[in-house]
Image (cartoon, helix red, strand yellow):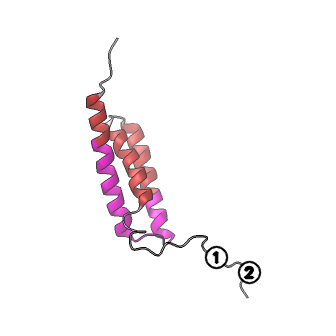
Amino acid sequence: MELFVNKPLFTMEVWWDSFPSGHAVFFAALAGSAFGLKQKKWGLYLSTMAIIIALARVAAGVHWPSDVVVGLLFGGAVGFLLGHFFKRVFPKKDN
């Protein structure tokens, strides 16, 4: 007899629900934008968090390793480019 039955509240039976990992894309984009904005400490902190979250998604069996690797690369690249773009378009004004 099972004490706890794990039944998901929602099921998504679609082919795109796994690749790439949305969590990995989001957190890598945050890290990439920090690097694009020349915020190295924040970039390192957010990169570490993105990798931990990506590993946790794989360990939980929600994603394949390829899902999170592509998510990290894609999110990091887009975040860096956007951060770099905003740094150039809206430069810091000196008083």
Query: Can you say whether 63 is above or below 71 in the image?
Result: below
In the rendered image, the residue lying farthest to the top is 95
Q: Does the magenta stretch include residue 70?
A: yes
**The residue under label 1 is which amino acid type?**
Asn
Percent from the top left, x then y, of residue 29?
A: 37, 48
The answer to whether residue 94 is magenta is: no
Where the C terminus falls, by quadrant? top left
Q: In which quarter of the image is the N terminus?
A: bottom right
| Residue 40 sits above or below residue 78 on the image | above
- Read off the residue under disc 2: 3
Q: Residue at x 38, y 51 (%)?
A: 28
Residue occupying image coordinates x 31% and y 55%: 74
Q: In which quarter of the image is residue 8?
A: bottom right
Task: Write down the quadrant of residue 4 in the picture.
Answer: bottom right
Q: What element carries label 2?
A: loop
- The residue at 35%/59% (across/down) is 71
Look at the picture and state if 75 lies above or below 69: above
User: The residue under label 2 is which amino acid type?
Assistant: Leu
Rounded to the nearest whole Å, what is the CA distance between mark 1 and mark 2?
A: 10 Å
Which of labels 1 and 2 is toward the front? 1
From the image, tell me which residue sits under label 1: 6
Q: Residue 25 location, x and y as percent?
A: 38, 55
Coordinates of residue 41 in the picture (x, y in percent) = 40, 38
Q: What stretch is highlighted in magenta?
A: 53-81
